[in-house]
Image (spheres, grey):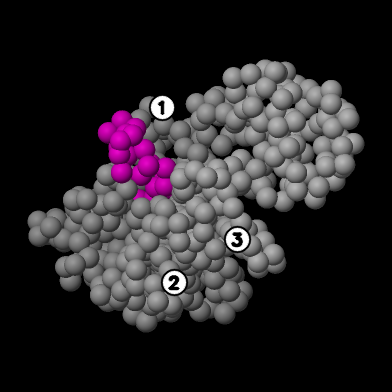
Amino acid sequence: MCEAASEGRARGVLLYVERTAEGAPTVNVKWSQMGPYRQPAALPASGYNRACMDAPLAGLLVADLTQNVAGPTCTQILGDMGAEVVKVERPGRGDDARAWAPPYWGDESATFLAFNRSKRSLAVDMKQAEGRVVLERLIARADVFVQSLRAGAVEELGLGWERANAINPRLIYCSVTAFGTEGPLKDRPGYDPLMQALGGIMSVNGHPGQSPARVPVSLVDMGTGMWAAIAILGALRERDRTGRGANVTTALYETALAWSVIQMNQYLGAGEAPQPQGSGTAMICPYEAFPTRGAWVMIAAGSDALFVKACEALGIEGLARDPRFTDNPTRVAHRAELFDALSAVTRALTSADLLARLQKAGVPCAPILTLDKVAGEPQTEASGMLVSAKHPRLPDYRAVGLPIRWDGVRPPVSRVPPLLGEHTAEVLAELGYDQVAIKELASRHVIQL
């Protein structure tokens, strides 16, 4: 990884180099049909938004027609790995997530900032013919096109798979959908909580006898974005071999099913629908949160040997010899009795005392921390996951980084999340529009500068 762009960016290779099946660089012949190539704008001297030319996906261009969480998660991953991502947004409003606030960070939605670094913003009205021409020019030069519009909307714009493939046969075309392209629900919209409900996740979350509980992290949205990124990487590798693009689809509903693989297997095998387990899990015991003096501690005694160690650490060695608790299946069958027996001991201890005893015995355990505590944890600091970057509007800006390192280095924030239309003129210049044409498009409200 690097902290500044190499001289390759000045030559334009970041946006427009492709490779043959043998890996040799080659130029897309369609460029000549769209006018002369214009150099990207020079990097700002302030140090904001510096691209990384030796990142794994450097040299790839991603046209990003997504919003909310799932699609932006995918394109942010690609951008963090070095791809040049152009986020295409509606003038005036942009991505709906820009209005998902409070909480704000400065004057910007904290939620939008979470999923839109490593991108440039191009604001263009795609309902106007000239706006669609802009997007077609971008697609013609792109390696990847990601869209997450409602079912049928991208076809209404004239940019479905067939049209996009005709414009650019090497294009990896990825649709992030609600329910996929088949089935009775394929035309319905979808959001993370709907998929947690319909996909069964909410039925096993929370505590028995209480109201259904959504997992508060957007695991379906973010998971779908991860699957999309994985699929795109596979399609790019296949393109290296064949020279052809591919039509990739992923779906929120299918991600919800994939995340439920353990519980679904339990149902398929035993014929009984799994029930909520609170902080625990159905097949291991003790493997849940236990009360302490004023707090809670998570204990994960995932084997018979660890259970014996936990009992010894708590001074209740005889509990491990109780016929109800001698092995994991019997402990699972007598879960309530075991919880009561252990809780009678843990409630009398402070969290620090309980953690110290268990850790000394080698029993996996953890305090249950709030996020303010997590942000200040020494392990969080050592991990480098909160990545600082210069930001023109937020002096305290930090991003939750990509949880991957290459050769020991985590990707830096190459671009902070953009303002709406912040890079419209810059991107249009790279697509061959001169300043007169750009001003004319702006005057007719085709674009937002």
**Residue 448 sits above or below residue 365 on the image:** below
Position of the N terminus by quadrant: top right
Disc 2 is placed on an element classified as loop
Identity of the residue drawn at 60% across and 76% down: 241
Quarter of the image where one finds residue 27: bottom left
Tell me the magenta residue range: 100-120
Using the numbered discs, state the Cα–Cα distance from disc 2 to disc 3 in whole angstroms. 25 Å
Identity of the residue drawn at 24% across and 70% down: 133
Query: Can you identify the residue that label 2 sits on?
Result: 180
Which amino acid, by three-letter code, is at mark 1?
Asp
Identity of the residue drawn at 51% across and 79% down: 244
In x, y percent, where is residue 425? 24, 53
Front label number (2 vs 3): 3
Q: Is residue 425 magenta?
A: no
Query: Can you identify the residue that label 3 sits on?
Result: 273
Query: Can you identify the residue that label 1 sits on?
Result: 396
Front label number (2 vs 1): 2
Is 220 in front, or is 79?
220
Front label number (3 vs 1): 3
Which amino acid, by three-letter code, is at mark 3?
Ala
Can residue 143 be seen by looking at this rendering? no
Which amino acid, by three-letter code, is at mark 2?
Gly
Few, some or many residues within 10 Å of mark 3 (<14, 14–19, 20+): few
Quarter of the image where one finds residue 265: bottom right
Image position of 276 (left or right of 326):
left
